[in-house]
Amino acid sequence: MGKVSEVYRQRVAEGRIEPDPAQISVLPHLDRVLDDIAATPAPEKRSAWRVFLGVGSPPPPAPAAKGLYLWGGVGRGKSMLMDLLAEAATVPARRVHFHEFMQEIQAGLNRARQRGDQDTVRPVALEVAARVRLLCFDEMQITDIADAMIVGRLFQVLLEQGVVIVTTSNRVPEDLYKHGLNRQLFLPFIDLIRQRLEVVCLDSPVDHRQGRLTGGQVWFCPADAAAKAAMDVIWDDLTGGAAGEPRRIEVGGRSFTLPLFAGGAGRSGFWDLCGKPLGPADYLALSRGVQVLMIDGIPRLSASNYNEAKRFVTLIDALYEAKVRLIASGADQPEQLYNEGEGSFEFERTASRLREMQDAGWGGGSSQP
């Protein structure tokens, strides 16, 4: 279609979207991105294979089309608007969760190191630029020192190559990687965002996820004997009475074990998944291997179990993106699991996603704002 505003109006007419004034106010900015791309000549690009071989001289810097940094509170519809943008685009576009993209970049950097490349970031960025003109990142958040050191250089090369970047975040750019290790090295990236991306706040008072009606109970608290008994009943129903067996999940030459798996459903205790040194790649592999995941015994989260809490946030992000149905028992309701201390701000998004994932229509590839 070429216009995000047209797709939005169509969804409203079909009853698939409730019109929101704050979302509507952002539509001209999204349309502007597509208009700018259409008005800017496509840059000269080498094929990914020629990039790999280093054949030919690099193309000149591409004309600049300004991207977009859309930030705001959880549940305001940022991800939904991102989906509409990718759908309306008429140029090669990719919409990807930031965690997943950075895992791909890390894998590419490892290949570049094995080749002995001096600048490992540039060839990886050139491979991405050879495939897409519009790159849409959902949920940008920088919490890892490795990502913080890579992302600035990565974006610089992508932008030089004429890739237009649109990203969503819960934070204003100046709050990215806040209080992070060696944050002063990250500050030029914030300047780059301000220079090359239009920063727009989606300032809606409505959390659309909270407004959904929940279906059958899939979150049990407290995580006591009664909760376990209720979870056992659901497990028996999902698996047809099968006890389930451990399932080994392979990730990049290593593996970890999901304690129980049967009939497309997995089950694990919190500590089995979050008390071990697992990361985004592991959770992405897990989310691709199950249709339903049951997690027993999610504790209260705080500074005392910060690493486990951080892994839990990453796990929920992976399950959410893959539309995996989640059934869990926890020490309290999602909004009350992590109320204070470092990481509590980021957990607001996780709590909102946990609430959304309780909706009866969640999972199985269903479309969610």
Image (cartoon, rainbow, N blue to C red):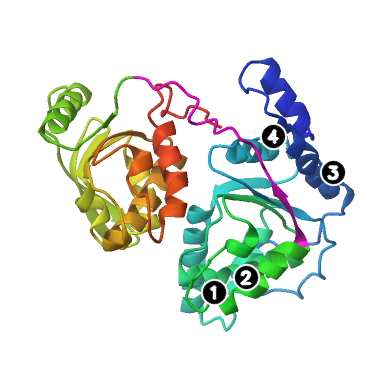
Label 1 secondary element: helix
**Which amino acid type is marked by label 3?**
Asp
**Which amino acid type is marked by label 2?**
Gly
Label 2 secondary element: helix
Frontmost residue, 89 versus 21: 21
- Circles 4 and 2: CB atoms closer than 8 Å: no
Residue that badge 3 annotates: 35
Residue 149's label in the rendered image is 1
Q: Whole-Å distance between the Cαs marked 1 and 2?
A: 7 Å
Q: Whole-Å distance between the Cαs marked 4 and 1?
A: 33 Å
Instruction: Please check the rendered image and state whether residue 203 is part of the magenta-colored stretch, yes or no.
Output: yes
Dot 4 surroundings within 10 Å: few (below 14), some, or many (20 or more)? Answer: many
Q: Whole-Å distance between the Cαs marked 3 and 1?
A: 32 Å
- For the question of whether residue 23 can be seen, the reply is yes
Region of the chain picked out in magenta, as a range: 196-215
- Circles 1 and 2: CB atoms closer than 8 Å: yes
Q: Whole-Å distance between the Cαs marked 4 and 3?
A: 19 Å
Residue shown at the point (48%, 55%) measured from the top left: 99
Residue that badge 4 annotates: 23
- The C terminus lies in which quarter of the figure? top right
N-terminal of the two: label 3 or label 1? Answer: 3
